[in-house]
């Protein structure tokens, strides 16, 4: 069996650079599309987001498998919370990006911007890591 290894620095750096360039181009395109979407919404989303009231979170630990009745009540509670924020339930495929697709759908009226939503959430979590550690764990 023969193994062929690329020469050091031959194509790995050019592949890495083209990958970074592609991501930058993707980010630029997403930013342009989102700015067009914001213009179409005529400030409706910004108004909706700034007027949100806080709903207190009551953490709960499941010590048993929930019954069908418990799960149904939880689902209705979720629907009530969504309704309080002017949002609604949309079923999305469970592909590992489903939460980001769902947020993208609610914020931008399309699940197509899930990559940008993911990046912004990761950035926010990284900036707030100390606060998150103190309040969550």
Image (cartoon, grey):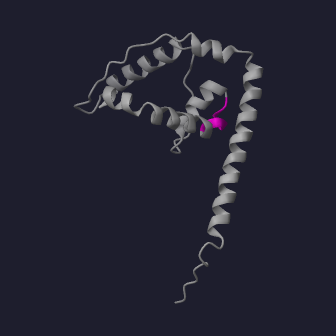
- Residue 93 position by quadrant: top right
Residue at 64 percent of width and 16 percent of height: 46
Position of residue 106 measured from the top left corner of the image (x, y, whole percent): 60, 25
Residue ID at (61%, 31%): 104
Residue 1 among those drawn in magenta: no
Q: Is residue 91 visible?
A: no
Is residue 89 in view?
yes
Q: Residue furthest front?
A: 9
x and y percent of residue 59 in the render?
A: 31, 23
Q: Which image quadrant is residue 34 in?
A: top right
Quadrant where the C terminus is found in the figure: top left
- In the image, 86: left or right of 11? left
Classify residue 102 by image quadrant: top right
Residue 134 x %, y %? 31, 28
Q: Nearer the viewer, residue 129 or 44?
A: 129
User: What segment is highlighted magenta in the picture?
Assistant: 110-114
Please state the total of marks drawn on the protein image. Answer: 0
Q: Residue at x 70, y 52 (%)?
A: 22
Q: Who's the residue at 22% across and 31% down the image?
A: 63
Residue 88 in the figure: left or right of residue 62: right
Q: Main secondary structure of the magenta part?
A: helix
Q: Is residue 112 magenta?
A: yes
Q: Please identify the residue farthest to the bottom as the structure is shown.
A: 1
Quick one: 111 or 115, which is closer to the camera? 115
Judged from this view, the residue extending furthest toward the left is 63
């Amino acid at each position: 069996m023969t193994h062929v290894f690329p020469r050091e620095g031959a194509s790995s750096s050019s592949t890495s650079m083209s990958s970074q360039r592609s991501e930058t181009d993707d980010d630029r395109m997403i930013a342009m599309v989102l700015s067009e979407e914001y213009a179409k919404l005529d400030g409706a989303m910004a108004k909706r987001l700034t007027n949100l009231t806080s709903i207190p979170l009551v953490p709960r630990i499941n010590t048993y498998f929930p019954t069908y009745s418990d799960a149904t009540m939880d689902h209705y509670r979720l629907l009530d919370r969504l309704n309080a924020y002017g949002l609604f339930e949309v079923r999305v495929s469970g592909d590992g990006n489903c939460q980001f697709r769902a947020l993208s759908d609610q914020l931008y009226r399309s699940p197509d911007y899930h990559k940008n939503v993911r990046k912004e959430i990761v950035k926010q979590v990284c900036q707030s890591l100390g606060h998150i550690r103190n309040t969550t764990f």
